[in-house]
Amino acid sequence: MAKRGLSMGCFFQFIFLVLSLFIQHFATEYADMSVSHYVHDILLDNLPIMRVDDVLNYGVQIFTLFIIGCIIIEPKRIPFIFKSLALFFLIRAAFIPLTHLGPSPLMAPIDQSDLLANLVMGNDFFFSGHTGTPFLLALIFWDEKFIRYVSLTASFVFGSAVLLGQLHYSIDVFAAFFITYAIFSIAVKIFPKEYKLFKE
């Protein structure tokens, strides 16, 4: 009965997670329709421009598979991870439409044939999901050094890539760490049962 209850709970949390991703997608579509002008950025004005779509597309896919593997090993981790990620995407969806900045005119091209790129790329600048998502997972898995270091590395690599590709402003990347830490702290407070189960 306990396993069945956990399975049903995980199913509904998965639906919640998928719904939050759709809400973020619609927020991005709104940002795309409301896009304004590019503004100068001290880092983007001085960094070299690189094509980074392979790093982002394949890197995100590999990192996602790695996290899925970590979850499968311990299914009790699912409720807190799914709810924390859903909270992350909902809060990000609330930020995306607020400021209508335009993309850099020097933005590196992204392979539009990649399904994942079409789902997560757009004028959704603030704050960087590529930086924040792996950092959130690093915070969640903080006590497990290997997963923590892999997640922190992914956050650094993806954050650097979106800057080098001029896909984000520098404030999007640096603010992601602070906002993500706040989201993790909120998740611990509002999902105490799931967090306790995760830590058992």
Image: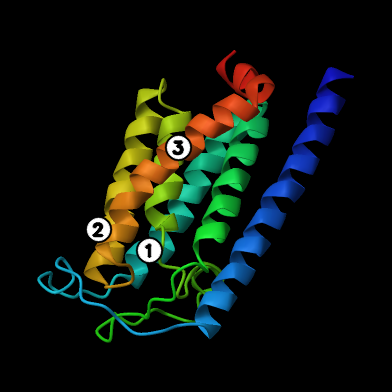
Q: Which residue is mark 2?
A: 160
Q: As drawn, is 153 to the left or to the right of 134?
A: left
Residue nearest the observer in this picture, 163 or 113:
163
Query: Measuring 27% from the left and 86% from the top, which residue is drawn there?
Result: 105
Label 2 element class: helix
Pick out the residue farthest to the right: 1
| Count of labels in the image | 3
Q: Amino acid at mark 1?
A: Leu
Location of the N terminus (image quadrant): top right
Q: Is residue 87 visible?
A: yes
Q: Amino acid at mark 3?
A: Ala
Location of the C terminus (image quadrant): top right
Q: Which residue is mark 3?
A: 182
Query: Measuring 79% from the left and 27% from the top, which residue is drawn there?
Result: 6
Q: Which residue is mark 1?
A: 56
Q: Is residue 135 above or below residue 200?
A: below
Q: Nearer the viewer, mark 1 or mark 2?
A: 2
